[in-house]
Image (cartoon, coloured by chain):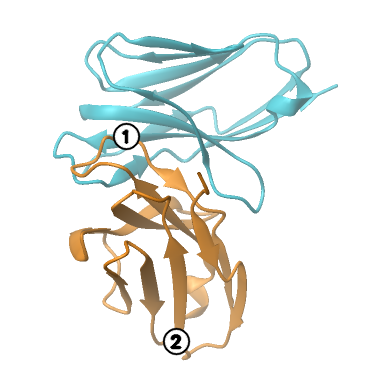
Chain colours: A cyan, B orange
Amino acid sequence: TQLLEQSPQFLSIQEGENLTVYCNSSSVFSSLQWYRQEPGEGPVLLVTVVTGGEVKKLKRLTFQFGDARKDSSLHITAAQTGDTGLYLCAGEGTSNTGKLIFGQGTTLQVKP
Amino acid sequence: KAGVTQTPRYLIKTRGQQVTLSCSPISGHRSVSWYQQTPGQGLQFLFEYFSETQRNKGNFPGRFSGRQFSNSRSEMNVSTLELGDSALYLCASSPIHPGSGEQYFGPGTRLTVT
């Protein structure tokens, strides 16, 4: 059974601080996605990483896929109150089944 | 392009009843997946359809079923509702199957079972 362990589960920081969210597994994934979800809404896709060692940047957000494609991280620089939300990592197994395995999520609160 | 749409957005049902939820994928997307989201279990995969065929199924009882139509629209049905079925049900569509990994989610249907 493929599992994704996401940490931390909760994060409360001041505006302007940096933070990193981690997503770890003992399984290899063919791709890994990061989503952000607002209360009462569906997850919104932020990025997909496919290649081991890949780094993608989206403004103040930096995403990295581990060399072995078993882990990933999301780093936010100079967090803003608008970054508040639930961040989810999701991996697709190597069998390409169209099924995503989700981490438990990280609830981020950025205080002004 | 219009995003994934789900209807209804909110639903209240009584134990023992059944419910049907609907999902319209992004135009051109042929793969539709369904997920259940609860505070305790997070997002869990229910099933995935492509070209009207169920290609993958999660670990849910047979009360949970689905189908996909020729226009890629999908429905899921839950029979004999239990209190534990209260959740946000999310539908996601994907442009390629086998999956490219990228799935685009609808706003979800909030189901409350009383």
Q: Which residue is rendered at x = 25% and y = 10% of the image?
A: A67
Are the residues at dot 1 and dot 2 in contact (C-beta closer than 8 Å)?
Answer: no
- Pointer 1 residue: A91
Mark 1 chain:
A
Q: Mark 2 points at which residue?
A: B18
Q: Quick check: B5 above or below A93?
A: below
| Front in this rendered view, residue A14 or B24 | B24
Q: Residue at x 61, y 50 (%)?
A: A41
Say which element carries label 1. Answer: strand
Q: Is residue A80 left or right of residue A6?
A: right
> Within the image, what quadrant is residue B111 found in?
bottom right
Residue A26 showing in the rendered view? no
Residue in the foreground of this view, choosing between B87 and B72: B72
> What percent of the width, then of the height, locates residue A111?
81, 24
Residue B3, x across and y down, in percent: 51, 48
Dot 2 lies on which element?
Answer: loop
* Mark 1 residue type: Gly
